[in-house]
Image (tube, rainbow, N blue to C red):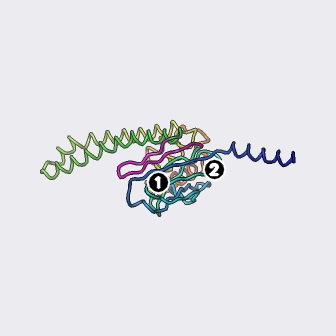
């Protein structure tokens, strides 16, 4: 009887110490109601040339605008929320009670320190994206009014370049500030996913310059940088020939 009690107590202690994510979601998007949502993560070995979240770790159905995920997590890990083949939003699976809000304008995750940090960054970047969109609309209006390309560039182009530069600096700083946690390599994957093949851009080179060894040894980072540098060397050889 004592042995059985000891075993039961041990299991309870192990269970209570396990890290767990608990996600409560709300959606005001009508087309999501009744559909399945999937939490997917990227391959552990860093396979693929982009952030391909192929492994499904959890799923649920949206019912009357509500959905819920619960599961164990060994350590914080970047994930993507999908419906079918469409990515809805990124998030961090961390030991916390998380809240997801999805509507036609914004998507947000809150309740855990890493997700709060990630979406505070997204909020800043979205402000810059909105400013850039407004400049693009102004440029279109000026073209329709018959303004010259030189005038458009003088009034809009330079401001747009500054906004794009500020966005790049914000993204680069975010990765550098999070070298030591899952957000650094996680957002690096998202950043690289915009390119069809690995490429060593000025921004990516700035991120990897001076990066700590544990960041560079992340499977995805290591593979991406290796292939990007190989493509750069190969391209230069062809140009020289």
Q: Is residue 241 visible?
A: no
Position of residue 8 measured from the top left corner of the image (x, y, whole percent): 78, 47
Q: Circle 2 — which element?
A: strand
Q: Circle 1 — which element?
A: strand
Which residue is denoted by mark 1 in the rendering? 66
Sequence-first disc among 2 and 1: 1
Furthest-left residue in this view:
146
* Left or right: residue 51 compared with residue 14: left
Magenta region includes residue 200: no
Position of residue 162 measured from the top left corner of the image (x, y, whole percent): 31, 39
Task: Kindly indicate the quadrant of the structure image that contains residue 154.
Answer: top left
Furthest-front residue in this view:
1
Position of residue 133 measured from the top left corner of the image (x, y, whole percent): 28, 47
Neighbourhood count class around disc 2 (C-alpha, 10 Å): few under 14, some 14–19, many 20 upward: some
The secondary structure that most of the magenta stretch takes on is: strand
Q: Which residues are magenta?
A: 95-110
Which residue is denoted by mark 2 in the rendering? 72
Look at 51% across and 38% down and name the residue there: 176
Look at 25% across and 43% down and name the residue there: 157
Between 35 and 231, the residue placed more toward the observer is 35
Nearer to us of marks 2 and 1 is: 1
């Amino acid at each position: 009887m004592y042995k059985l009690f000891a075993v039961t107590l041990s299991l309870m202690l192990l269970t209570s110490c396990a890290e767990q994510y608990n996600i409560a979601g709300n959606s005001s998007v009508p087309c999501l109601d009744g559909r399945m949502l999937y939490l997917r993560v990227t391959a552990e070995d860093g396979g693929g040339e982009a952030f391909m979240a192929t492994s499904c770790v959890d799923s649920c159905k949206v019912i009357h605008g509500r959905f819920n995920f619960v599961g164990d997590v060994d350590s914080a890990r970047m994930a993507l929320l999908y419906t079918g083949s469409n990515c809805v939003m990124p998030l961090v699976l961390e030991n916390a009670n998380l809240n997801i809000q999805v509507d036609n304008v914004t998507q947000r995750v809150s309740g855990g320190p890493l997700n709060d940090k990630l979406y505070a960054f997204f909020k800043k970047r979205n402000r810059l994206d909105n400013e850039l969109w407004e400049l693009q609309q102004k440029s279109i209006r000026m073209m329709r009014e018959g303004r010259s390309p030189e005038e458009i560039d003088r009034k809009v182009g330079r401001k747009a370049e500054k906004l794009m530069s500020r966005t790049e600096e914000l993204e680069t700083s975010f990765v550098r500030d999070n070298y030591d946690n899952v957000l650094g390599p996680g957002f690096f994957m998202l950043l690289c996913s915009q390119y069809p093949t690995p490429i060593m851009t000025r921004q990516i080179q700035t991120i990897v310059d001076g990066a700590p060894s544990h960041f560079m040894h992340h499977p995805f980072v290591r593979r991406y940088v290796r292939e990007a540098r190989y493509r750069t060397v190969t391209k230069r050889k062809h140009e020289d020939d």
